Amino acid sequence: MFDIGWTELLLIGIVALIVVGPKDLPGMLRTLGRFTAKMRGMAREFQRSMDEAADQSGMRDVARDLRKMTSAREMGLDAVKGAVNLDADDDISTQAKPVKGPKAAPATEAAEDERAAARRRIAERTAADAAAARAEPAAKPAAKPAAKPAAKPAAKPAAKPAPGKGGSA
């Protein structure tokens, strides 16, 4: 309940022995035992009263019906799960049979040949473009970036007139 290990319990016992003293320690432990027994009894009584209230209101029946309606077995999902989860021993290749259908039409074979030829031409053109791109930088030396023009000095702000000693009329 409190998740106290033996080392913590031993430490608490030693501290209690030092603080309370060896004469009063048995009486204190007896009182502590009675107190915990009363607390457990109260908790048990509270739990029983809550269970009785749930029984009287019909909550258990509703919960049981809800559990029954949502169970996979009642909905027939257990059969689906069994069909989906194939064992590792099952070899699909032995269970499946090859489909024997009509041979491809000559027009389909011609279209496949045409696509293969187009792929070859594209691959050749791409290879030629890549070779040309590699040869081009070797032929031209790298151009130096143009020098930036020197920055112009900033113009000084106009001088403010000095405050006059005499007033203006």
Image (tube, rainbow, N blue to C red):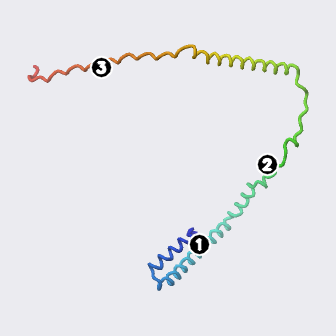
Left or right of 114 on screen, residue 57:
left
Q: Residues within 10 Å of mark 3 (few under 14, many from 20)?
A: few
> Amino acid under label 3?
Ala
Q: Position of residue 112 (x, y in %)?
A: 81, 21
Q: Position of residue 105 (x, y in %)?
A: 88, 22
> Amino acid under label 1?
Ala
Q: Which image quarter is the N terminus in?
A: bottom right
Residue 5 to residue 117: above or below: below
> Amino acid under label 2?
Asn
- Label 2 vs label 1: CA separation? 46 Å
Mark 1, secondary structure of its residue? helix
Mark 2, secondary structure of its residue? loop
Per the rendering, the mark at residue 85 is: 2
Q: Residues within 10 Å of mark 2 (few under 14, many from 20)?
A: few
- Label 3 vs label 2: CA separation? 80 Å
Q: Circle 3 is placed at which residue position? A: 154
Q: Please tell me in which quadrant of the rendered image residue 2 appears.
A: bottom right
- Label 3 vs label 1: CA separation? 86 Å
Left or right of 136 on screen, residue 121:
right
Q: Residue furthest left?
A: 166
Q: Residue furthest top?
A: 139
Q: Tell me the residue at 68%/16% (across/down).
A: 128
Q: Circle 1 is placed at which residue position? A: 43
Q: Tell me the residue at 47%/16% (across/down).
A: 144
Q: Which image quarter is the C terminus in?
A: top left
